[in-house]
Amino acid sequence: MAAGGNANAKRIALLLWLLVAFFYFYLSYDYIRVTTNDGQFGEYVQYVVQIAGNGHRPPKEIRDLLLVRAEELSLPIRSDQIKIAGSGDSLNVDVTYDVDIEIPGLLRAVYTRTFDHKVKYVGPH
């Protein structure tokens, strides 16, 4: 009987290690995905600020463009997290938001990452 109990213990240990590996890889994947999407969003913020500064675009238009892009990238950005000051040559945009990294099946965040983009218009030299 000891051999049967030993085999069951090994199966349980293997199952636990597989479960740990699954959670580790899922968290790594989720973290990398969020970081990559934020990088794309940061580049887009730079682009929008330059175009909006050149064209003296209104803050509402800038905010709407950023919110649409955030939705495309599945980033949880709300309108109140986008601060727009000035216009034209003095345009400044600040976007700060948090993303929760979660384990599937749990309703709690394991890790929260804060992203902050502060972009100023840079005119042609």
Image (cartoon, grey):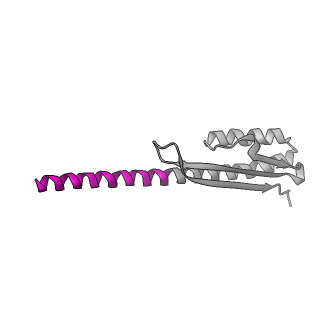
Q: Nearer the viewer, residue 25 or 3?
A: 3
Residue 83, horizontal then vertical, whole percent: 80, 48
Number of on-image labels: 0
Residue at point 85% right, 56% down? 123
Q: Is residue 28 magenta?
A: yes
Quadrant, the C terminus: bottom right
Q: Main secondary structure of the magenta part?
A: helix
Residue 117 picture quarter = bottom right
Q: Is residue 105 magenta?
A: no
Question: For this view, does 99 lie left or right of residue 108?
Answer: right
Question: For this view, does 55 lie left or right of residue 77?
Answer: right
Residue 24 picture quarter = bottom left
Residue 26, horizontal then vertical, whole percent: 45, 50
Residue at point 28% right, 54% down? 14
Q: Residue furthest front?
A: 1
Q: Residue furthest bottom?
A: 125
Question: For this view, does 70 lie left or right of residue 56?
Answer: left
Q: Nearer the viewer, residue 46 or 109?
A: 109
Q: Nearer the viewer, residue 36 or 115?
A: 115
Residue at point 58% right, 48% down? 100
Residue 27, horizontal then vertical, whole percent: 48, 52
Q: Which residues are magenta?
A: 1-29
Residue 17 picture quarter = bottom left
Q: Residue furthest left?
A: 1
Residue at point 68% right, 49% down? 97
